Image: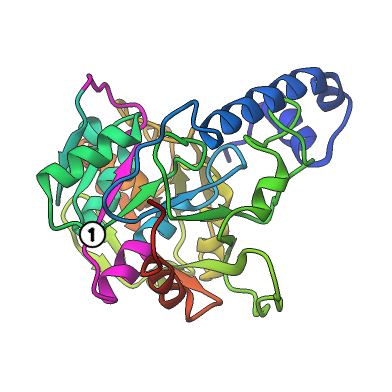
Amino acid sequence: MNTPSPKASLLARQWQHGGWLSTLLRPLAALTARVVARKRAGYRDGRRPAYRAPVPVVVIGNIYVGGTGKTPMVIATVEGLRARGYTPGVVSRGYGVKLGPQARVGQGELEAARFGDEPALIARTTGAPVAVHPRRALAAQALLREHPQVDVIVSDDGLQHLALARDVEIVVQDPRGIGNGRLLPAGPLREPASRLREVDAVVTNIGVPDGRAAPPQATGPRQVAMWLEPADARRIEDGARRPLADFAGQPGVAAAAGIGNPERFFTTLRSQGITLAATLALPDHHDYARSPFAGLAATTILVTSKDAIKCAALHDARLWEVPVRAGFSDPLLFDWLAQRLRQPRPA
């Protein structure tokens, strides 16, 4: 069983509940607050120019550092908009990828080493064209130049990347919420919690459905619960498929995840009746340059799609990908989004 280091566990507890270390770091959090406020003011008053694409832009991001489930939300958004007549394209940072001054654009089966694991997964799953560059405006321009049929851009992350103007902002959070409510490094927030009142929708990734109805709302951002529904497992080595239920009750099943919150994946598997003999929590965006599974005593290893896209070169027949699809408490979510995109845009 993989367990976090004592330092990581301490920081996670402090970020969630507060404590002596968080209090000690509050002066640095005040500095973060000043930097964030100055940056936002610069774009608001025009001192810093923002690129406004000729098509609507939907930004899907978070204020809590690390993974909250943005990638399934991006995939669902692309598919939801396509079903409503749009031709979406995606821009992303391309985390961990070496890029020069030009954005990189691709479609279909992309190499994670050249585009990043999340953009490669989005491209494979949706078939939408994807452009990557840390400067999202450059990515958006390159995307539209190579794929002029794109009529809406979905930005994977980038809530804080204000150089790309946006028409709709969607925040994805998880049950950790805003943690202790403090900014980095005293807390887990990239921006003040008040930012949640300014976005268009807040989607809470609850992991597995729990039967709770969405709270009634009269004002403020649209509030939606999201959960992840696992599909049939796929063996990475040869593409063979099996219902996930086949692994319930099977001995020697392990799970590994290199995502922002690995425990969420493990909980999803356990909710399907699978007993996990071991779990391996890897750093987010783990590169799998070398196999981390050599010492894992298991006959089957279940991994996320984000991990699977980088594991093919390992040629380990024990590895099975468990794809997931996002489910939502709000059946009209993408109807609402499409309607928002049809509204007149700022000049």
Q: Is residue 179 left or right of residue 160?
A: right
Residue 341 among magenta residues: no
The residue positioned 24% from the left and 35% from the top of the image is 115
Residue placed most toward the observer, 265 or 248? 265
Could you classify mark 1 by the number of other residues whose Cα lies within 10 Å: few (under 14), some (14-19), or many (20 or more)? some
The residue positioned 58% from the left and 69% from the top of the image is 224
The residue positioned 68% from the left and 55% from the top of the image is 197
Residue 111 visible in the picture? no
Residue range in magenta is: 76-101
Three-letter code for the amino acid on which mark 1 is drawn = Asp
On the image, the x and y values in percent for residue 86 come to: 24, 68
On the image, the x and y values in percent for residue 310 come to: 27, 39
Above/below status of 208 relative to 285: below
**Residue most toward the front?**
347
Above/below status of 57 relative to 231: above
Rendering quarter of residue 192: top right
Per the image, the residue denoted by label 1 is 151
For label 1, the SS is loop
